[in-house]
């Protein structure tokens, strides 16, 4: 027999407590009912929430005598039926971009998943290489080669690829239950009341806009406690299992799982409850948080989230050593893009962002992101091409700091293709040889393109789906990026926990980092300078490592010589890899000078002196900057 009493736990959603179920709901209304349904859709019980169950704006009810694992529920608030705002599992949401119009109900999620020995990986930001993807778009294309396309299971199929590439964490664009097609009119940012452009159907063979809108990205109000049902391959009642399996398999491969969480609500306690829930229930390793600064402060101070990665865009840092907090902003993106295409007055700014690595917070560096050009589009288009969005080209960023290398869009001109290939490698070298934590957007490493669209938020088609290119150029770039990631991981001096100082703190004859121009130890920073050599001394990461690493940058359209510091006796500076064809840099070193070709980056290595008092001891690195 069903028994109803006041709940004693401050819970959100519904939790099983022994033989009872505790339902918690925040609502200012005093006209609230809990509606329980059978699997057939038949109403099983109607339970009014009276004031005896209410504390402030919070209702908490304990119900015994029911088998809620086999029931569905929703709330009736002021005469309107709405899903549980903190529901963890929903019905009638399994078809992406389509709604039947049937009522969406919540379901109690059984807590019987076998995590085995799964534990958080707790990788530091310093050792991380992030890989951002859209769950549906990552494997939905017919080129993906997976069986369960566009799903969490599809990501599992791609784990061998991710591991081979060398990334340490995936960052998921919104993967919780958001309104992609207007099935949640009660949300304040529902498509039903605020359409997101006209969009495109998920049919690559049908051209042009359609009348039915689609929210592809998911940066809107949402049901944050539930994995997105339409991202699941298994169309079953419990959609949580597939997400948990994905996280467990990622962890087995040494890969972390981070989630982007976009909040429009201002309830800080609900935000904290949500993040704690995903950490405890789904074992996620971190969040990219979009929301109010006040909520970010509470997240930072929360003891449960103290070892969880938190990425944001405006954390100013405090408590040195508390490096689970990270900043991701466009400072690196804009500077790197302008330096890449050879703009005036960018060298000093690039040196600054290349080196930036604050003690109290991590930096997330990226050159592309979901809201902008892909990497290959960055070197193929001077302007955005957003016609398919249905907004007359008014949407999207106008200042992209891109350069098409001489031809807008696709081309077969050999010189343009060759220059783009080199510029792509330059961009990845800038990203992966900088001190901050690099973030790569899925597909950038194998020439994935959006046709110049820099804001495809409402397009669900081959335009936004990752195209797994198998061309020779795509395979070459992928291999290059894989090698870059491996080089970064091998040399800890490139990804330290704190910023390099530019001084010889160990008194070994070399600073941890130094900058060089046409003369060793002296770097010119005139507004027209576009070339610099950055040298790293590996001993500052490992006293037993006597290697010097020299990265020669030349973003000028003319060739330049850079000076190489003196190293160990009989040691030779050896070119290791570069963005230009090997034939152009194989013999680039002559008499402690390296010839760097136009728009090229070259990495060289050498052994340092091992005797104190040798050349370069306590060397002060000089720069000349005569800009007004």
Image (tube, rainbow, N blue to C red):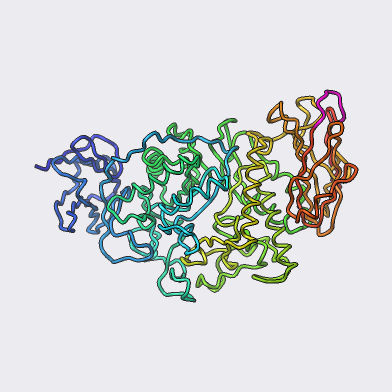
Depicted 590 relative to depicted 222: above or below? above
Quarter of the picture holding the N terminus: top left
Q: How many marks?
A: 0
Q: Would residue 621 appear left or right of 224 to someone viewing this image?
A: right
In this view, the residue in front, 210 or 292, is 210
In the picture as drawn, the residue positioned furthest to the left comes out as 1
Residue 526 spot, x, y in % from top left = 84, 50
Q: Quadrant of residue 186?
A: bottom left
Q: Would residue 277 appear left or right of 553 to someone viewing this image?
A: left
On whether residue 95 falls in the magenta region, the answer is: no
In the picture as drawn, the residue positioned furthest to the top comes out as 612
Residue 80 spot, x, y in % from top left = 25, 59
In this view, the residue in front, 441 or 215, is 441
* Majority secondary structure of magenta residues: loop
Residue beneath the point at 25% across and 61% down: 103
In this view, the residue in front, 242 or 53, is 242
Residue 454 spot, x, y in % from top left = 58, 64
Residue beneath the point at 86% across and 43% down: 563
Depicted 68 relative to depicted 205: above or below? above
Residue 208 spot, x, y in % from top left = 49, 76
In the picture as drawn, the residue positioned furthest to the right comes out as 591
First to last magenta residue range: 608-615
């Amino acid at each position: 027999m069903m028994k109803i009493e006041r709940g004693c736990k401050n819970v959100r959603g519904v939790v099983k407590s022994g033989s009872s179920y505790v339902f918690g709901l925040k609502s200012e209304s005093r006209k609230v009912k809990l509606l329980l349904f059978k699997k057939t859709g038949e109403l099983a019980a109607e339970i009014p929430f009276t004031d005896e169950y209410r504390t402030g704006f919070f209702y908490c009810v304990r119900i015994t005598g029911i088998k809620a694992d086999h029931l569905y529920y929703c709330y009736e608030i002021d005469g309107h039926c709405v899903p549980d705002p903190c529901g963890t599992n929903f019905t009638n949401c399994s078809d992406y971009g389509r709604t039947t119009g049937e009522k969406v109900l919540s379901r109690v999620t059984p807590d019987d998943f076998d995590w085995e020995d799964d534990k958080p990986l707790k990788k530091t930001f310093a050792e991380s290489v992030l890989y951002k993807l859209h769950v549906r778009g990552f494997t939905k294309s017919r080129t993906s080669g997976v069986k369960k396309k566009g799903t969490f299971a599809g990501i599992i199929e791609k784990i061998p690829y991710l591991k081979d590439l060398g990334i340490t964490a995936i960052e998921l664009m919104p993967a919780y239950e958001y309104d992609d097609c207007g099935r949640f009119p009660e949300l304040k940012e529902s498509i039903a009341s605020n359409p997101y452009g006209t969009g495109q159907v998920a049919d690559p063979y049908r051209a042009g806009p359609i009348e039915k809108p689609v929210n592809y990205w998911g940066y809107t109000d949402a049901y944050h406690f539930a994995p997105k049902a339409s991202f699941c391959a298994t169309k079953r009642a419990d959609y949580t299992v597939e997400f948990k399996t994905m996280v467990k398999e990622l962890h087995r491969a040494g890969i972390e799982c981070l989630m982007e969480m976009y909040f429009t609500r201002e309830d800080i306690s609900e935000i904290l409850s949500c993040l704690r829930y995903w950490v405890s229930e789904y074992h996620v390793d971190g969040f990219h948080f979009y929301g109010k600064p006040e909520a970010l402060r509470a997240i930072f101070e929360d003891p449960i989230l103290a070892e969880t990665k938190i990425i944001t865009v405006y954390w100013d840092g405090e408590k040195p050593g508390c490096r689970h907090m990270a900043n991701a902003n466009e400072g690196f993106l804009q500077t790197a893009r302008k330096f890449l295409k050879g703009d005036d007055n960018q060298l000093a700014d690039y040196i600054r962002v290349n080196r930036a690595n604050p003690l109290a917070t991590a930096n997330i560096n990226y050159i592309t992101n979901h809201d902008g050009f892909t990497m290959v589009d960055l070197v193929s288009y001077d302007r955005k091409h957003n016609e398919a969005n249905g907004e007359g080209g008014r949407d999207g960023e106008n200042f992209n700091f891109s350069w098409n290398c001489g031809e807008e869009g696709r081309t077969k001109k050999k010189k343009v293709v060759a220059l783009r290939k080199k510029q792509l490698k330059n961009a990845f070298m800038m990203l992966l040889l900088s001190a901050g934590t690099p973030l790569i957007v899925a597909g950038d490493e194998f020439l994935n393109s959006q046709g110049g669209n820099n804001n495809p938020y409402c397009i669900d088609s081959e335009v936004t789906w990752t195209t797994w290119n198998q061309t020779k150029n795509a395979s070459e770039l992928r291999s290059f990026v894989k090698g870059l990631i491996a080089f970064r991981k091998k040399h800890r001096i490139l990804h330290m926990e704190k910023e390099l100082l530019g001084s010889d703190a160990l008194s070994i004859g070399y600073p941890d980092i130094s900058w060089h121009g046409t003369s060793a130890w002296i770097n010119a920073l005139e507004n027209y300078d576009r070339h610099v050599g950055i040298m790293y001394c590996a001993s500052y990461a490992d006293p037993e490592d006597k290697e010097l690493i020299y990265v020669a940058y030349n973003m000028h359209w003319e060739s330049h010589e850079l000076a190489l510091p003196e190293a160990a006796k009989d040691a030779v500076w050896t070119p290791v890899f570069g963005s230009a064809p090997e034939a152009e840099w194989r013999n680039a070193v002559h008499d402690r000078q390296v010839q760097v070709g136009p728009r090229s980056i070259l990495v060289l290595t050498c052994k340092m002196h091992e005797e104190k008092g040798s050349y370069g001891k306590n060397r002060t690195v000089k720069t000349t900057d005569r800009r007004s």
